[in-house]
């Protein structure tokens, strides 16, 4: 990323009140960007966005991504140059409970933000729209090789995965409609970790809730392997892609993987064991019984981002887990959460410069 590029750059972020969105707001603010956020109320209690008072750093608009007239009005007023679309129903188990809302949010919501970009006046329209999907969009998640951007889409039959695969196809259609007016990009990242995530049915937030209360963490699929990465790793990838594609739609349009290398492919059990080292007395056990199906192993081939964007994960797994544990524990002690985010962003960017 080039700080001079982001200074006073107008950026429109959907889903800015979520975990990943909160870190993106803090990172963009650090780079000097002017951010307009569009989202529902924070999806968790407690909320990283609220705890860090990030509403003070953005033009904060609370509305539903499914409300196209409202969305178009806010996009038109913001006159943003770059759009990053994070708003989503992002939990697999929740998608089974409410598949219709999942499809409405993830498919229609994506179509709405791209329609708002498409209908904006050409001289005021965004130049880049990045749609964040997931590594779960691929049809064959259990292949014994890393998945490439041109592998078949389709998800693993759960509503979340298939809705995100549909969002990818919506983005492809709008890329054709917009031509070189606006770069339409999709980003597929691995499982992110980091301080301040309080979502249900995610491993580290579940671990923090259990360990903080002296309870035993129950794991559904301890042997499942995922490409874990600290939240700042894919976020810097997203912003690097937006920067490079600005004014170069034909060269960068399409899908991009932002997954870590083989050293980050840990089982859930390995992840929890390492994280538990930072929590005295922490314990976990396998939760027997029937659970919604999940892919056993996911691997991404991110050589495209490495070769063309010079992007790779900067934080080793042990360090990413230590940063996460330190963050949660400092929050519990009443530390200034925004200052915590700022310090970790500064440390991360310094590490990037050393590569």
Image (cartoon, rainbow, N blue to C red):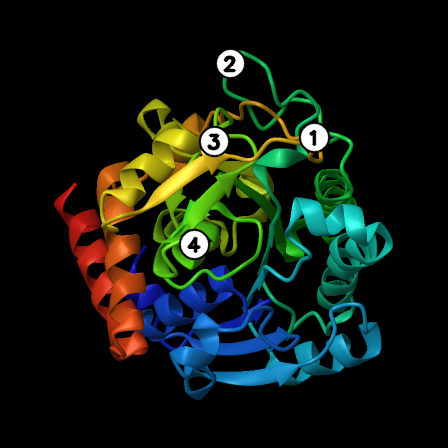
Q: How far apart are marks 3 and 2 (CA)?
A: 13 Å
Q: In this view, does 14 lie above or below 183?
A: below
Q: Earlier in the sequence, mark 4 or mark 1?
A: 4
Contact? badges 1 and 2 (CB < 8 Å):
no
Name the element at disc 1.
loop
Residue that appears at 51% across and 13% down: 145
User: The C terminus appears in which quarter of the rendering?
Assistant: top left
Residue 17: which quarter of the image?
A: bottom right
Question: Which quadrant of the view contains residue 77?
Answer: bottom right
**Residue at the top extreme?**
144
Q: What separation in Å lies between label 2 and label 4 (alpha carbons)? A: 34 Å
Badge 1, how many Cα within 10 Å: few under 14, some, many 20+?
A: few
Q: Which of 327 and 144 is in front in this view?
A: 327
Residue 274 location, x and y as percent?
28, 37
Camera-near label (2 vs 4) is 4
Q: Name the residue under label 4.
A: 210
Mark-to-mark CA distance, 1 and 3? 15 Å
Q: Name the residue under label 1.
A: 293
x%, y% of residue 184?
63, 50
Residue under the image location 45 percent in, 48 percent down = 241
Numbered mark located on residue 145 in the image: 2
Specify the farthest residue to the left.
354
Distance, label 1 to label 2, CA atoms, is 21 Å
Which is in the foreground here, disc 3 or disc 4? 4
> What residue is pinned by disc 3?
226
- Residue 48: assigned label: none
Mark 4 or mark 3, which is nearer the start of the sequence? 4
* N-term-proximal mark, 3 vs 2: 2
Mark nearer the N terminus (1 vs 3):
3
Q: Mark 4: which secondary structure?
A: helix
Cα separation between marks 3 and 4: 21 Å
């Amino acid at each position: 990323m080039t700080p001079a590029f982001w200074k006073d750059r107008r950026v429109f972020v959907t889903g800015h009140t979520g975990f990943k969105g909160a870190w993106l707001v803090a990172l963009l603010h650090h780079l000097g960007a002017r951010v307009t956020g569009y989202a529902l109320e924070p999806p968790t209690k407690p909320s990283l966005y609220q705890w860090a008072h990030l509403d003070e750093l953005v033009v904060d608009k609370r509305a539903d991504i499914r409300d196209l007239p409202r969305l178009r009005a806010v996009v038109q007023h913001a006159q943003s140059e770059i759009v990053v679309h994070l708003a989503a129903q992002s939990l697999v188990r929740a998608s089974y409970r409410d598949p219709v809302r999942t499809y409405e949010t993830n498919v229609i919501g994506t179509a709405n933000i791209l329609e708002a970009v498409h209908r904006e006046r050409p001289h005021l329209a965004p130049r880049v729209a990045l749609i964040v999907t997931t590594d779960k969009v691929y049809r064959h998640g259990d292949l014994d090789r890393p998945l490439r951007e041109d592998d078949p889409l389709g998800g693993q039959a759960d509503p979340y995965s298939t809705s995100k695969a549909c969002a990818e196809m919506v983005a492809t259609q709008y890329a054709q409609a917009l031509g070189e007016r606006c770069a339409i990009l999709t980003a597929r990242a691995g499982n992110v970790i980091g301080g301040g995530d309080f979502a249900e049915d995610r491993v580290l937030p579940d671990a923090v809730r259990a360990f903080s209360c002296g309870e035993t963490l129950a794991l559904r699929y301890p042997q499942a392997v995922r490409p874990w990465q600290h939240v700042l790793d894919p976020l810097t990838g997203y912003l690097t892609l937006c920067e490079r594609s600005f004014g170069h739609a034909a060269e960068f349009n399409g899908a991009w993987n932002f997954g870590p290398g083989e050293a980050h492919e840990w089982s859930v059990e390995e992840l929890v064991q390492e994280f538990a080292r930072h929590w005295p007395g922490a314990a976990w056990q396998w939760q027997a019984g029937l659970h919604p199906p999940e892919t056993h192993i996911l691997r991404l081939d991110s050589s495209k981002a490495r070769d063309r964007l010079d992007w790779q994960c900067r934080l080793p797994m042990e360090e990413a887990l230590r940063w996460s544990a330190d963050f949660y524990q400092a929050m519990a002690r009443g530390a200034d959460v925004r200052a915590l985010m700022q310090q970790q962003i500064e440390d991360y960017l310094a590490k990037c410069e050393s590569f």
